[in-house]
Image (tube, rainbow, N blue to C red):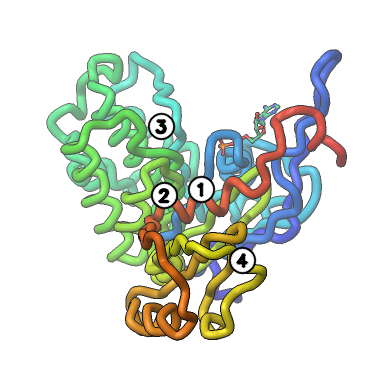
């Protein structure tokens, strides 16, 4: 048995075009591992391939090639077991308007073959603060209530892995807090959580591991603390009077580079030695300094850095199989 909740290996998806539209390479042989018990953030700009990945895991989209398994069960060789081990909260708020929350959970539990005696309708509806609305028609629920109902619905079969696709998009702050409170509780009880979100701060605060995906490729997948250590970096930009052909010798031990002939950019780790040694090295180099400025990076910068170096267009250039 593997220690991973989800294992994805060389997963590829090409959406076949029709007539005038070309084929679309949505996932380019991605590898991704979600450890059991983690709170995993899957981030990426629009069109990166997040939903495609989730939909393949959920059995809603067929992969082109590669492998994926959930809780050790291959999604193709063992689809029933694979599906029994995940709950997916979709982005869209699609409901049959004439079902009540209680009926909806019951129908869903029936679909998963959960025996009546083991159904947890009351517990789930209470957990998402919808017990009072249990007999109301779904169409009368607010957007936030519907979102919570979807979470309850995805949990009827008590899956060890819960995937939330943009669960708080367009949801007000108070409700977001409530949702996260519930998700945190599930996580504390042992559920592995995978979430996609546009809100970087949300991912930073909630997730212990973050993967960033861009143009169908995984550009990083690492513990949040490690990712944030990159953010710990700060740039010192030094404008110098005399043009330099190369980096002054005293700066060779630093993460420093020339930008043109009259600017030196030095990266420092703020929790490391700080600016002192850099200033000493600049003095040693006997440069005439016109100006010094600093540039701090944040998660947004890291995200942009990691997602902007392959700005291939969304056109047919990346459709080759
Ligand atoms: P994300 O969820 O990160 O926004 P998606 O997985 O939805 O990204 O999309 C990845 C790429 O695949 C995008 O270029 C998108 O246009 C394309 N795509 C998604 N679904 C389809 C589809 N059903 N048919 C054709 N192309 C699709």
Please indicate, yes or no, whether residue 56 appears anywhere in the rendered image.
Answer: yes
Q: Which mark is residue 72?
A: 4
Task: Name the residue carrying label 3.
Answer: 107
Q: Earlier in the sequence, mark 3 or mark 4?
A: 4
Q: Is mark 1 within 8 Å of ligand 1?
A: no
Per the model, the C-alpha gap separating discs 2 and 3 is: 42 Å
Residue at (81% x, 33% y) in the render? 317
Q: Is mark 3 within 8 Å of ligand 1?
A: no
Task: Name the residue carrying label 1.
Answer: 304
Q: Earlier in the sequence, mark 4 or mark 2?
A: 4
- Place of residue 81 in the rendered image (x, y in percent of width and height, measured from the top left): 59, 55
Vertically, is 141 above or below 184?
A: above
Q: Residues within 10 Å of mark 3 (few under 14, many from 20)?
A: some
Q: Who is closer to the viewer here, 208 or 46? A: 46
Q: Would you say the residues marked 3 and 4 are in contact, meaning their CB atoms lie under 8 Å apart? A: no
- Place of residue 283 in the rendered image (x, y in percent of width and height, measured from the top left): 40, 81
Q: Would you say the residues marked 1 and 2 are in contact, meaning their CB atoms lie under 8 Å apart? A: yes
**Quadrant housing residue 1:** bottom right
Task: Name the residue carrying label 2.
Answer: 300
Please indicate, yes or no, whether residue 102 appears anywhere in the rendered image.
Answer: no
Per the model, the C-alpha gap separating discs 3 and 4 is: 27 Å
Tell which tag, 4 or 2, sits nearer the viewer: 2
Q: Residues within 10 Å of mark 1 (few under 14, many from 20)?
A: few
């Amino acid at each position: 048995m593997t220690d991973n909740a989800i294992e994805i290996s060389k997963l590829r998806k090409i959406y076949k075009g029709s007539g005038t539209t070309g084929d679309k390479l949505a996932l380019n042989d991605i590898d991704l591992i979600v450890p059991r018990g983690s709170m995993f953030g899957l981030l990426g700009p629009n069109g990166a391939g997040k939903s495609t990945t989730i939909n393949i895991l959920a059995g809603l989209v067929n992969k082109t090639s590669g492998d994926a398994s959930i809780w050790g069960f291959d999604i193709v060789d063992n689809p029933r077991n694979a599906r029994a081990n995940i709950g997916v909260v979709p982005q869209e708020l699609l409901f049959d308007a004439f079902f009540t929350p209680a009926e909806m959970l019951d129908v869903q539990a029936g679909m998963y073959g959960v025996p009546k005696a083991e159904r947890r309708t009351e517990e789930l509806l209470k957990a998402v603060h919808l017990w009072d609305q249990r007999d109301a028609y779904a169409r009368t629920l607010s957007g936030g209530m519907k979102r919570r109902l979807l979470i309850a619905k995805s949990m009827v079969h008590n899956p060890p892995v819960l995937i939330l696709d943009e669960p708080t998009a367009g949801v007000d702050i108070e409700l977001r807090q409530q949702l996260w409170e519930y998700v945190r509780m599930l996580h504390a009880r042992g559920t592995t959580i995978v979430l996609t979100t546009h809100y970087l701060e949300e991912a930073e605060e909630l997730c212990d591991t973050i993967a960033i995906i861009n143009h169908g490729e995984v550009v990083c997948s690492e513990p949040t603390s490690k990712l944030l250590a990159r953010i710990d970096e700060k740039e010192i930009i030094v404008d110098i009077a005399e043009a330099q052909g190369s980096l002054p010798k005293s700066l060779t031990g630093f993460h420093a580079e020339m930008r043109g002939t009259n600017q030196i950019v030095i990266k420092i780790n703020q929790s490391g030695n700080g600016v002192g040694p850099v200033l000493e090295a600049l003095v040693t180099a006997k440069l005439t300094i016109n100006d010094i400025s600093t540039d701090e990076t944040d998660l947004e910068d890291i995200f942009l850095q990691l997602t902007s170096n392959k700005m291939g267009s969304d056109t047919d250039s990346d459709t080759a199989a």
